[in-house]
Image (cartoon, rainbow, N blue to C red):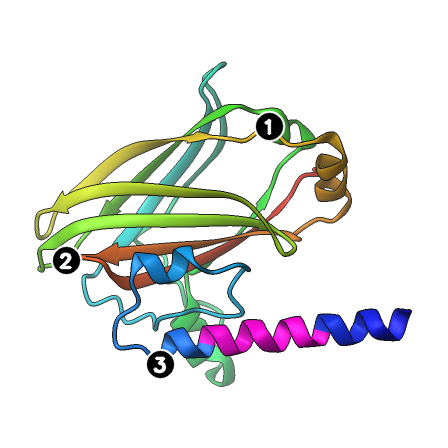
């Protein structure tokens, strides 16, 4: 029985990698493409070239019912993201710098109903038209929720702030127990589009036993 289970897991991983590779071969990855994904992606679906120079400088999460700030992090523009790296890992660190976040929450986070997420970001010298984020949350291979937010149009060289409202689904207690017992098995893909073309892809994972 354990051998069969192992074979199934390997097959699933191969299918997931193949699906990712098929998308990477496309000239343009669209919102419809990522909305069809049944699992968390194995890697990043686009490079970190960031042609629109979109840079996120602050991210804050608050409980809307109590106005309690749960998470607030800002980027210090005077600190290089590549400090303390060796020549061997400098290229890899530069490529994926800022694309992954690990969140440590208490179990009470899973009981929240409405959360406000404030993001501050700046853009470069190009027009950013129809800036859109699709964020997909998974526990293992189960889709928990898909969030779809439109930032709209961002003028060149602008600094922008907006708050999106997350309405969390009510989770069954047995699923909550599993998510608490399996830290970092809850993961998300955040896909960012400009004019329906994928330009940024970030990832996160979550622990709820803090």
The residue range painted magenta reads: 10-20
Which residue, given by chain and number where applicable, does mark 1 sit on? 170
Is tag 1's residue or tag 3's residue first in the polypeptide sequence?
A: 3
Spatial distance from mark 2 to mark 1, Cα to Cα? Answer: 39 Å
- Measuring from the top left, give residue 75's x and y in whole percent: 36, 48
Spatial distance from mark 1 to mark 3, Cα to Cα? Answer: 37 Å
Magenta: main secondary structure equals helix
Indicate whether 95 appears above or below 54.
below
Residue at image location 33% in from the left, 58% down from the top: 32
Magenta stretch: includes residue 6: no
Could you say whether the residue bearing mark 3 is in a helix, strand or loop? loop
Residue 126 sits in quarter:
bottom left
Residue at image location 51% in from the left, 65% down from the top: 41
Is tag 2's residue or tag 1's residue first in the polypeptide sequence?
A: 2
- Measuring from the top left, give residue 178's x and y in whole percent: 75, 43
- Measuring from the top left, give residue 118's x and y in whole percent: 35, 34
Q: Residues within 10 Å of mark 1 (few under 14, many from 20)?
A: few
Which residue, given by chain and number where applicable, does mark 3 sit on? 25
Q: Residues within 10 Å of mark 3 (few under 14, many from 20)?
A: few
């Amino acid at each position: 029985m354990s051998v069969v289970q192992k074979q199934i897991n390997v097959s699933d991983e191969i299918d997931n990698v193949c699906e990712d590779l098929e998308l990477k071969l496309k000239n343009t990855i669209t919102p419809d493409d990522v909305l069809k994904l049944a699992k968390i992606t194995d890697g990043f679906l686009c490079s970190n070239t960031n042609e629109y120079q979109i840079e996120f400088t602050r991210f804050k999460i608050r409980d809307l019912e109590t106005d309690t700030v749960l998470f607030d992090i800002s980027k210090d523009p005077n600190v290089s993201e590549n400090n303390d790296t060796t020549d061997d890992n400098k290229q890899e660190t530069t490529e994926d710098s800022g694309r992954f976040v690990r969140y440590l929450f208490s179990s009470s986070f899973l009981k929240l109903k409405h959360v406000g997420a404030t993001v501050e970001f700046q853009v470069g010298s190009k027009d950013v038209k129809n800036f859109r984020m699709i964020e997909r949350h998974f526990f293992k291979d189960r889709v928990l929720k898909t969030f779809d937010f439109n930032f709209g149009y961002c003028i060149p060289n602008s600094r922008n702030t907006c708050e999106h409202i997350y309405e969390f689904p009510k989770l069954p207690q047995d699923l909550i127990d599993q998510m608490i017992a399996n830290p970092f098995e809850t993961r998300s893909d955040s896909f960012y589009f400009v004019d329906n073309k994928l330009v940024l892809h970030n990832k996160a994972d979550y622990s709820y036993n803090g």
